[in-house]
């Protein structure tokens, strides 16, 4: 099982049988409120009939079409629909099947772009500590999570460096929205550039808001600075928006929310409401055109997946994006954000809590770790919440909440209220 203590799980499994709207149902018939949109991906809520219908129709009509030297028209229609939600100019789309594939595709596009410009020596990639970019060799190399890296350390990409992470509770504890301190952490990029020289660096990749390592909200001014420094040195900026795109922050993308446009964006999860595995990379027109223009006649980019633009995925993507637009779910998320923030920060003084942070419909609740067993306290909160009908996520001693965007205000209260009750019972 992925990222799971297999032996413990099999002794005491938690098995889901059904899902509808805001709830899962376990095999034992227990209702569980989904406080995490599955794994940050079911943004429109579970079991949406329009998506089910679209997938079913597509499966009967065209189950599969090869995407090498052939295609199907929905792949282009779906790409156009995705492009419409991207910041202006990011309208070239490459389909993948997951966030990990999107990240590795984005890194390869960055290298291909520089090579096409005659700067093939730009091969260095800069990630960030505590970054999560999936599990491909590219993703774990630029990622900053040591357990994901150490076993494979001899096989990581050779030319990678890391920015410092932005998490500083000594200055930013209990921030509402973006923290005030930390803009200058972006200056570390200048140090890395001075060390390696800009002419060797292809791209910087960050999550605009780091989700998986515990909801690290970017300090005010930080992303602006990263954009300015990368631009100054001809380095591409890649935003990994696998979690943040499709409404999580109350806008179509974090780029739109923060008003900062990267050169390349990695997408997945909410793109299909998780109904069919799907991902995509959105690329600025000039990056795309440069790669195409420089290639000899024939294939311009030697990359792709058997299931790129799988017909079921494109059907699911189109139906999902239609729901987002028709139901105005991103605006809904934005409208709910103040109530969500208020409810989350009610936990500021709860037992064990050392920080509450939030942005859009994401919140992180950090607990003091048990001295002898880091992570154990949050794991207990997770298990107890689940037993009491609430799904939360945890990383280390941080509880992460990221509900479907269809959540009602009462359910927001239910999530944070239940966590508060559970915290009272946890040593
Ligand atoms: C920011 C980010 N990038 C990449 C991934 C990897 O996505 P996947 O698990 O679909 O490969 C994730 C998954 O959580 C993620 O949060």
Image: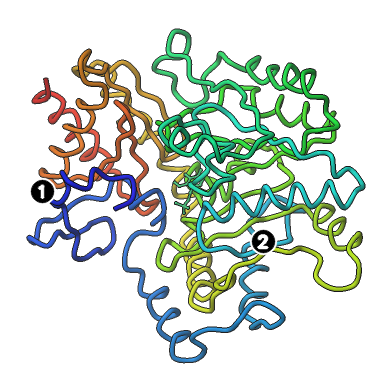
- Residue 183 occupies quadrant: top right
Say left or right for 185 vs 9.
Answer: right
Which quarter of the figure has residue 379? top left
Viewer-closest of 283 and 421 = 283
Check disc 1 and report its element: helix, strand or loop.
loop
Q: Which residue is mark 2?
A: 84
Give the percent coordinates (x, y) of residue 276. 43, 68
Give the x, y percent position of residue 79.
Answer: 65, 68
Q: Which residue is pictured at 57% across the width and 53% down the height?
A: 267
Residue furthest out toward the front: 154
Q: Is mark 2 within 8 Å of ligand 1?
A: no
User: Foreground: 57 or 383?
Assistant: 383
Q: Residue 252 at what x, y percent from top left?
A: 57, 51
Image position of 28 with respect to 352: above or below: below
Give the image location of residue 296, x and y in percent: 91, 67
Front-lying residue, 354 or 21: 354
Q: Which residue is mark 1?
A: 12
Dot 1, crowdedness within 10 Å: few (<14), some or many (≥20)? few
User: Residue visible at 63% across and 17% down?
Assistant: 185
């Amino acid at each position: 099982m992925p990222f799971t203590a297999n032996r413990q799980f099999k002794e005491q499994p938690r098995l889901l049988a059904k899902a509808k709207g805001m709830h899962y149902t376990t095999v034992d018939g227990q209702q569980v409120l989904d406080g995490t949109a599955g794994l940050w991906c079911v943004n429109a809520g579970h079991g949406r009939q329009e998506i089910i219908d679209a997938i079913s129709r597509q499966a009967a009509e065209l189950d599969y079409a090869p995407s090498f030297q052939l295609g199907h028209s929905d792949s282009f229609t779906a790409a156009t629909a995705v492009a419409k939600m991207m910041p202006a100019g990011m309208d070239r789309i490459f389909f993948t099947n997951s966030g990990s594939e999107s990240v590795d595709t984005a890194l390869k596009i960055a290298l291909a772009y520089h090579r096409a410009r005659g700067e093939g020596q730009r091969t260095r990639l800069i990630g960030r500590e505590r970054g999560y970019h999936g599990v491909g060799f590219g993703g774990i190399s630029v990622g900053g999570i040591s357990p994901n890296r150490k076993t494979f350390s001899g096989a990581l990409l050779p030319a990678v460096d890391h920015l410092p992470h932005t998490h500083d509770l000594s200055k930013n504890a209990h921030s509402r929205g973006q923290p005030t301190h930390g803009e200058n952490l972006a200056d570390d990029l200048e140090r890395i550039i001075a060390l390696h020289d800009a002419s060797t660096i292809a791209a910087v990749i960050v999550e605009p808001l780091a989700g998986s390592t515990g909801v690290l909200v970017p300090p005010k001014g930080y992303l602006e600075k990263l954009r300015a420094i990368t631009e100054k040195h001809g380095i591409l900026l890649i935003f990994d928006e696998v979690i943040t795109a499709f409404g999580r922050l109350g806008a179509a993308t974090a780029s739109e929310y923060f008003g900062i446009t990267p050169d390349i964006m990695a997408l997945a999860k909410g793109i299909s409401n998780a109904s069919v595995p799907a991902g995509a990379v959105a690329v600025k027109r000039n990056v795309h055109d440069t790669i195409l223009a420089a290639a000899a006649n024939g294939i311009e980019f030697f990359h792709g997946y058997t299931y790129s633009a799988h017909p079921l995925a494109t059907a699911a993507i189109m139906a999902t994006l239609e729901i987002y637009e028709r139901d105005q779910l991103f605006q809904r998320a934005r409208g709910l954000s103040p109530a969500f923030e208020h409810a989350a920060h009610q936990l500021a003084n709860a037992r064990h809590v050392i920080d509450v942070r939030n942005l859009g419909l994401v919140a992180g609740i950090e607990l003091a770790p048990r001295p002898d067993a880091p992570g154990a306290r949050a794991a207990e909160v997770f298990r107890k919440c689940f037993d009491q009908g609430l799904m939360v996520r945890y990383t280390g001693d941080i509880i992460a909440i990221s509900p479907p965007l269809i959540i009602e205000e009462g359910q927001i209260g239910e999530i944070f209220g239940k966590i508060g009750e559970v915290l009272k019972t946890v040593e």
